[in-house]
Amino acid sequence: RRTSLTRLLRRTASRLHTREEVCGGNVETWGSVLSRDSIIAWHARSFAGKHDQIERWCEDPDGPRVVRFTDPRQTDAWLRHLERFAHRDAPAA
């Protein structure tokens, strides 16, 4: 939660400052950020449910394999590992 909320707050603050379009020509405003329908409020409301769903997927022996990372460094290491295989198995040009 800390990682995703930190990233969300950083992106939101940046968009408030730069007036970068979010989607469909919309821009972040203090009113939108502080509203009940803001992305930050959505994060707070939805995080627990998404976390519980991921736990269920991880525990389901009949479901697809789940690769779960709890730290951004784990993701980076996994991607570097995959890149080694992608380059090794790539056809010669």
Image (spheres, helix red, strand yellow):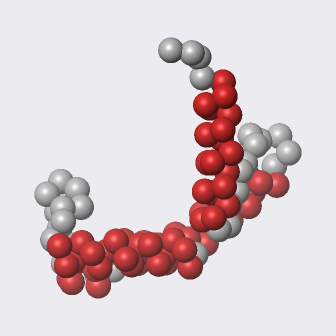
Q: In this view, does 73 lie above or below 1?
A: above
Q: Which residue is drawn at 66% across and 24% down?
A: 89
Query: Which residue shows up at 82% across the image and 55% down it?
Result: 59
Tell me residue 20's x, y (percent): 18, 65
Q: In which quarter of the image is the N terminus?
A: bottom right
- In the image as oriented, which residue stretches furthest toward the front? 93
Q: Where is residue 42 in the image (x, y as percent from the top left)?
A: 42, 72
**Residue at (66%, 55%) from the top-left corner?**
77
Q: Is residue 7 left or right of residue 88?
A: left
Q: In this view, does 4 lie above or below 13?
A: above
Q: Can residue 60 be seen in this view?
A: yes
- Report the number of numbered marks: 0
Residue 54 visible within the image: no
Q: Where is residue 9 in the image (x, y as percent from the top left)?
A: 39, 78
From the viewer's perspective, is residue 77 above or below residue 13?
above
Name the quadrant containing residue 7: bottom left
Image position of 87 (left or right of 26): right
Q: Quadrant of residue 32?
A: bottom left
Q: Where is residue 52 in the image (x, y as percent from the top left)?
A: 68, 65
Q: Which residue is located at x 67 percent, y 51 percent?
A: 78
